[in-house]
Every structure is written in structure tokens, then in C-alpha cells.
Image (spheres, rainbow, N blue to C red):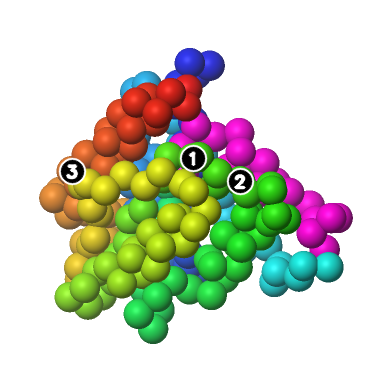
Amino acid sequence: MGNKIRIFGFGGSFRKGSYTKALLHAAKELVPEDAELEIFDIGGIPLFNQDLEKNMPAEVRRFKDGIKAADAVLISTPEYNYSVPGFLKNAIDWASRPYNDNSFEDKPVAVMSGSGGTFGGSRAQYHLRQMMVFLNAHMINKPEVIVTFINEKVSPEGVVTDQKTREKIKEMLEALVSWTNRLGRR
């Protein structure tokens, strides 16, 4: 385990039967042998308050430290109102603060999304990609994991059952590991 690429993953849905969480759990099953994936639940992160930057809540510190300690980051998001959920944006805001302590700085990042509609969360991904440009993260561009009609591809138990979706997740993880190695982040 010591020589493996460490990927820190988190998702943008709190829902019990979250499809976003199902994508993360599929990623954990499909991660390449030379990598490992830790999944972090952002549910305990409070609303961002700049007054607390110097003395961050413990859950925020764990989140920031997890990103910093990782070689790469994986974000899984649904799409709410053509964008990312507010609490996902909130967690990213915390991780990027205070000024000069951006946890995403120079970090390889992959993103995947899913929705019950025909766009599969693509608009949320584009907003995440815009955020990561400002945060100076290094996004992988392809393959994109944009899961349309995700409700038909995840079992009631929260397992991604669609083989093409699983293959795309595996390809994306392989690309993230390759990108991480190319950037010399190991």
C-alpha cells in the first residue's frame, strides 16, 4: 500500500440512496491495483465562515488534510439547477482557504457525475472544472464519466450495475493514475 497512488474521493449528495455515492463506491471497487481510494463524507462540514479560517472546525481540517495528503482527487457530483450542489461548493470553498492554503493547488483531479436526465450532470461538471481552473488543479479531460439516466444504472442497494458505466469509471481511474504519474505526484 505504501507505494500506491492515493486518491481522495468525495461526493456531492447526502441522500441515503445517492447515485453519486454509488459512483464513488464503484470507483473504489474498480481502482487500479497501483492505487487506492479513500472516500470522505463531506456531510459534517459546516457552512463556510471566513471568521473561522484561522481556527477551522476539526471536520474541515480533516477534509483539507485528506486532500493535501492524497496524490490525486476524485469528485462525484449530481447536478442541481444546472450546477453543483451548494454544500459541495461549500466544501471546496473551505478546502481552498485561507488564502495561500489551497488544498487543490497543483493536484490532479478527476470528476464524474450522474443524473436521471439526458445531460448526466454535465453542466455541474463544467462548473467544477471552472472552479478547478481557479484553484490551479490539474483536471483530466478524458474520458468523461457523465452518466445519463443513472436511476436505471444503479440498483436499489446502491450498486452500479451498468457495465458500460463501470468500464468508463475504470478507464477514468486509469487515466487519473496515469496523469498523476506524469505529473510526478507520487
Mark 3 residue element? helix
Where is residue 153, by image quadrant?
bottom left
Amino acid of disc 2: Ser
Mark 2 residue element? loop
- 49 horizontally vs 74: left or right: right
Residue, x 79% and y 59% (percent of image)? 53
Q: Give the percent coordinates (x, y) of residue 151.
A: 25, 70
Viewer-closest of 144 and 11: 144
Q: Which secondary structure class fits the magenta region best? A: helix
Viewer-closest of 28 and 125: 125
Q: Give the percent coordinates (x, y) of residue 38.
A: 51, 39
The answer to whether the residue labelled 2 contacts the one labelled 1, judged by CB atoms less than 8 Å apart, is yes
Viewer-closest of 70 and 29: 70
Amino acid of disc 3: Glu
Give the magenta part as a residue range: 52-73
Mark 1 residue element? loop
- 21 horizontally vs 101: left or right: left
Which residue carries the number 3 mark?
167
Q: Give the percent coordinates (x, y) of residue 20.
A: 39, 61
26 to 182, vertically: above or below: below
Which residue carries the number 2 mark?
103
Amino acid of disc 1: Lys
Where is residue 66, by image quadrant?
top right
149 to 32, vertically: above or below: below
82 to 73, vertically: above or below: below
Which residue carries the number 1 mark?
107
For label 1, count other residues whose C-alpha is less than 10 Å away and answer few (under 14), some (14-19) or many (20+).
many
Residue, x 70% and y 54% (percent of image)? 99
